[in-house]
Image: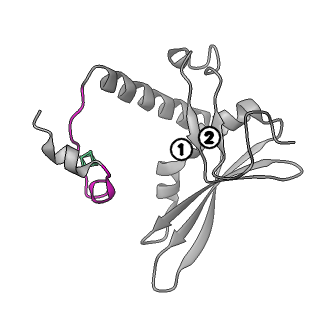
Amino acid sequence: MIPPGFTAGTNPWFRSGTWPTGCWPHFRGLQQLSRIDLALETSDSLNIVDFKTSRSRWSAEQVAESSGQLLLYSQLAGDLASKPVKLSFVVLTKTKTPDVSVHEVAFDARLLDRTLNIIEHVWKSISAGNVYPVPSMMNCPSCPYRKRCAAWTG
Ligand code: SF4
């Protein structure tokens, strides 16, 4: 049965309660609102899927680098679901002959903790007004804030 606060299907929203007391006390009282690409319930698990597109096939390193996003979803769903949560990326590779591959992501408490710590530091910096451009060939071309970023003078 789909847990309360969680709607299975395409693009379900789910919202955390407070962060687990004692696990990440620096997040206590904050809420996370997430919209995932797909949630599928089977008889023995809740499967959370994130879709990606790529110009080349994903390597194991790319899966590992991106897995923080799914781990955050898993924590949220884990708080709500009564079944084990399974995580995967489905990657559409936009090569001459398109390819679709599935990459399962195992739960990793250390990586989840690292991701939460990164979020905490970024949020503290934003709250303190400590923001500045960090240009990157990978992120800037598709960034929706390019005009505002280019207008930033310090
Ligand atoms: S264009 Fe976007 S991604 Fe690039 S530095 Fe500016 S804000 Fe960051």
Task: State left or right for residue 141 relative to residue 8.
Answer: left
Q: Position of residue 62 (x, y in %)?
A: 47, 57
Residue drawn at (24%, 26%) of the image: 130
In the image, residue 43 lies at what x, y percent? Answer: 89, 51
Q: Nearer the viewer, residue 99 or 7?
A: 7
- What residue is shown at x 54% (from left), y 21% (from top)? 30
Left or right relative to 18: residue 27: left
Question: From what the image shows, is residue 76 above or below residue 26?
Answer: below
Q: Residue at x 32, y 51 (%)?
A: 144
Q: Is mark 1 within 8 Å of ligand 1?
A: no
Q: Secondary structure at mark 1?
A: helix
Q: Magenta segment, principal secondary structure? A: loop
Magenta stretch: give its range.
130-144
Instruction: Confirm whether residue 107 shows in the render.
Output: no
In this rendering, is residue 12 above or below 121? below
| Residue sticking out furthest to the left | 153
Q: Amino acid at mark 1?
A: Gln
For marks 1 and 2, give the CA distance. 7 Å
Q: Position of residue 70 (x, y in %)?
A: 59, 45
**Crowd around label 2: few <14 · some 14–19 · many ≥20 (10 Å):** many
Query: Residue tagged by mark 2?
Result: 73
Give the residue type that dot 2 points to: Tyr
- Mark 1 lies on residue: 69
Q: Residue furthest bottom?
A: 96
Q: Is residue 131 magenta?
A: yes
